[in-house]
């Protein structure tokens, strides 16, 4: 008996990502499948923005019209929910006396940047100065957030090795906050200065802050392919593309970008970000930026390995090669976080725990 | 107890079939015979044709490898997502309803959806919003055995543009003691085989009345909002419910009014304004049916 094809059509979505004009040529059935795939990859907001820009779908059947309405309501709620969390954070941190900075998804929404449009955000990431971490934690706990159940290993993993506290979950809303004191783990080989990031951050409104544009891009670059999932890999590149297209037009952005990449010790991530945004989504990058970053190029073998990995993962095929690429990305994301021995111990422990008795 | 074989169902394990259920076009696919039997038994009055598109893409797939033979499984894949753990294969048919509930609750934001049993008589709709095990399905099954038309035993679907309620007649799920009570009252109705759900409760499905299915595109206005609660051994109590409280009940039981933002809230507020609102506690079905007859005849 032939097996039913029930998986979301990632290949179709990748084709649309590379060339959004293709949206106009999709059949209603394909359009429905692209909505499903985009929602799964948390790119529904992006898809709807492209659909608006290209006036698609056009003259569609009633069911597809309903599905587009549903998708609009869905991304509206995603954004509203995050804005409400930011509002509650603002209240929890009222008069706290130190800066707190939104990172990643929540920051894109707060700053109304392209990657924030209709974005589904699972965790709100917040950066605070390390010396005020305990105060920030206390403020959140006073306002209804609490730690979930953690065993001693988890607690040690977070407190000793990571750059964030264990997730704080709100008792009523179940919303999750990750409180950071750095943008990369303490055990990582790279150590961008949190003090510098915080000093250069920008106020959005009230006490809500986000990283300055260059730092926002460098943070996204440092996190490129970091969550070790294929879905995450595709979304990371789409985020970078959106940020670079938006900020890249501002005068001085690119020279700041090169300078700050060096200051923060993030030239390698910047190299990868520029390379894959250009290759996968044709992001416009000035030629002198590309040549300035060539100095940060990894050895040829590593570059080849990354190219193959990214190409396979982002090809959007489901099957054995892409799960292997997914696994390699997962291991790599951890490799960047920890020294080898610690990594070996951590992965061993995770693999044992996946099969409870 | 087989019924008219639907030849179109041979497409179930290939391109799929499209079932028109109220305002929704549902694509169903499955390689499991349980799904085919279920559709033949319960969906015989529905418009069904072959097709590969629709509001919802519902697939019920079997297990892989050894799971095809040893304690076989059925998994729901809903628009490419698997929100549930696999079920034992004998629940493949009924799982279709659970999958549809998930789809309507999560993926139909054109309408405001509230957890409620809904019936209609004389162009006026009675809404019974309540959490599970409040006896709303039992009440609904008893009402549609009389003169009421089935809209749904699970969802009040409200069009925020018009304030009208949309019928979505589907098989009615009965649990535990309600099964015998309704079987006794409605001997001529088609019931499915009794089974145990994932929480270990006995349940059966009941075929929706053919007339309700035929009139599935006839919308109607809301008239009564009654919040029921089954309380064993207690006398029937029936009292007015302040509109503000009725609204809180509706928002509590709504799957998605927040997804529609202000429009969703205004839609429910307008619904409450148009309804007579009551709270009902009951244990005797005959008693409550007589009461509802009196109240809605006014």
Image (cartoon, coloured by chain):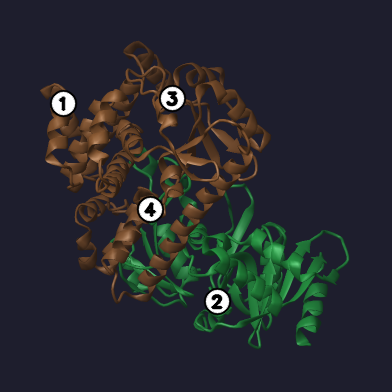
Cα separation, mark 2 vs mark 3, equals: 60 Å
Q: In the rendered structure, are the residues bearing label 3 and label 1 in contact, judged by CB atoms less than 8 Å apart?
A: no
> Crowding at label 1, few (<14), some or many (≥20) Cα neighbours within 10 Å?
some
**Foreground residue among A52 and B83:** A52
- Same chain for the residues under marks 4 and 3 in the image: yes
Percent across and percent down for residue A187 are: 39, 17
Mark 4 highlights which residue?
A39
Q: Secondary structure at mark 3?
A: helix
- Circle 2 residue: B167
Q: CA distance from mark 3 to mark 1?
A: 27 Å
Give the residue at x 20% y 44%.
Answer: A315
Residue A309 in picture, x, y percent from top left: 20, 33
Query: In the picture provided, is A347 more to the left or to the right than A287?
Result: right
Q: Position of residue B254 (x, y in %)?
A: 61, 62
The quarter holding residue B51 reads bottom left
Please tell me how crowded label 4 is: few (under 14), some (14-19), or many (20+) other residues with Cα within 10 Å: many
C-alpha gap between disc 4 and disc 3: 36 Å
Q: Which tint is chain A?
A: brown
Q: Nearer the viewer, mark 2 or mark 4?
A: 4
Residue at mark 3? A195
Quadrant in which the C terminus of chain B appears: bottom right
**Left or right: residue B50 compared with residue A291:** right
- Nearer mark to the viewer, of 3 and 1: 3
Give the residue drawn at x 31%, y 22%.
A336
Q: Earlier in the sequence, mark 3 or mark 1?
A: 3
Does dot 2 land on a helix, a strand or a loop? loop
């Amino acid at each position: 008996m032939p097996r039913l094809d029930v998986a979301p059509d990632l290949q179709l979505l990748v084709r649309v990502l590379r060339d959004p004009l293709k949206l106009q040529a999709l059949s209603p059935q394909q359009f429905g499948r692209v909505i499903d795939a985009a929602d799964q990859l948390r790119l529904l907001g992006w898809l709807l923005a492209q659909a608006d820009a290209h006036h698609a779908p056009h003259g569609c059947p009633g069911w597809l019209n309903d599905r587009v309405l549903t998708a609009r309501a869905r991304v509206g709620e995603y954004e509203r929910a995050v804005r409400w969390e930011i509002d509650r954070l603002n209240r929890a941190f009222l008069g706290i006396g130190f800066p707190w900075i939104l990172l990643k998804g929540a920051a894109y929404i707060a700053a109304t940047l392209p990657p924030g449009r209709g974005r589904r955000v699972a965790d709100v990431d917040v950066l605070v100065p390390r010396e005020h971490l305990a105060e920030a934690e206390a403020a959140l706990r006073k306002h209804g957030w609490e730690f979930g159940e953690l065993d001693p290993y988890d607690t040690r993993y977070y407190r000793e090795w990571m750059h964030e506290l264990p997730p704080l979950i709100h008792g009523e809303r179940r919303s999750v906050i990750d409180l950071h004191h750095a943008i990369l783990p303490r055990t990582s080989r790279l150590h961008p200065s949190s003090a510098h990031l915080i000093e250069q951050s920008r106020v959005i409104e009230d006490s809500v802050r986000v990283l300055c544009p260059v730092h926002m891009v460098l943070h996204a670059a440092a996190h490129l392919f970091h969550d070790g999932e294929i879905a995450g890999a595709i979304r990371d590149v789409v985020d970078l593309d959106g940020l670079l297209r938006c900020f890249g037009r501002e005068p001085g952005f690119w020279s700041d970008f090169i300078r700050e990449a060096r200051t923060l010790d993030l030239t390698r991530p910047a190299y990868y970000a520029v390379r894959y945004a250009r290759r996968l989504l044709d992001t416009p990058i000035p030629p002198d930026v590309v040549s300035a970053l060539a100095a940060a190029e990894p050895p040829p073998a590593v570059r080849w390995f990354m190219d193959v990995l990214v190409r396979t993962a982002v090809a959007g095929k489901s099957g054995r090669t892409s799960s292997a690429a997914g696994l390699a990305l997962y291991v790599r994301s951890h490799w960047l976080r920890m020294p080898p021995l610690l990594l070996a111990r951590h992965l061993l422990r995770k693999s044992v725990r996946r099969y409870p008795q | 107890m087989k019924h008219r074989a639907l030849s179109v169902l041979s497409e179930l394990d290939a391109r799929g079939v499209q079932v028109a259920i109220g305002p929704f076009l549902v694509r169903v696919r499955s390689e499991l015979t349980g799904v085919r039997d279920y559709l033949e038994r319960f969906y015989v009055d529905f418009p069904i044709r072959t097709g590969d598109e629709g509001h919802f893409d519902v697939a019920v797939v079997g297990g892989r490898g050894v799971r095809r033979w040893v304690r076989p499984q059925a998994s729901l894949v809903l628009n490419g997502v698997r929100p549930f753990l696999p079920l034992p294969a004998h629940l493949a048919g009924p799982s279709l309803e659970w999958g549809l509930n998930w789809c309507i609750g999560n993926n139909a934001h054109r309408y405001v959806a509230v957890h409620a049993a809904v019936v209609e008589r004389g162009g006026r709709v009675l809404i019974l919003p309540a959490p599970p095990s409040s006896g709303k399905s039992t009440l609904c099954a008893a009402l549609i055995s009389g003169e009421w038309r089935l809209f749904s035993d699970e969802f009040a679907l409200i069009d925020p543009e018009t304030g009208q309620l949309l019928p979505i007649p589907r098989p009615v799920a009965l649990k535990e003691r309600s099964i015998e009570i309704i079987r006794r009252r409605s001997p001529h109705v088609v019931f499915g085989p009794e089974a145990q759900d994932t929480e270990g409760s006995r349940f059966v499905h009941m075929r929706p009345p053919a007339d309700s299915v035929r009139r599935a595109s006839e919308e109607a206005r809301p008239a009564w909002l009654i919040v029921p609660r089954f309380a064993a051994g207690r006398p029937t109590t029936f009292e007015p419910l302040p509109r503000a409280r009725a609204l809180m009940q509706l928002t509590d039981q709504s799957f998605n009014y927040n997804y529609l933002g202000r429009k969703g809230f205004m839609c429910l507020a307008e619904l409450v304004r148009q309804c007579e609102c009551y709270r009902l506690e009951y244990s005797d079905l005959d008693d409550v049916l007589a009461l509802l007859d009196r109240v809605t005849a006014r």
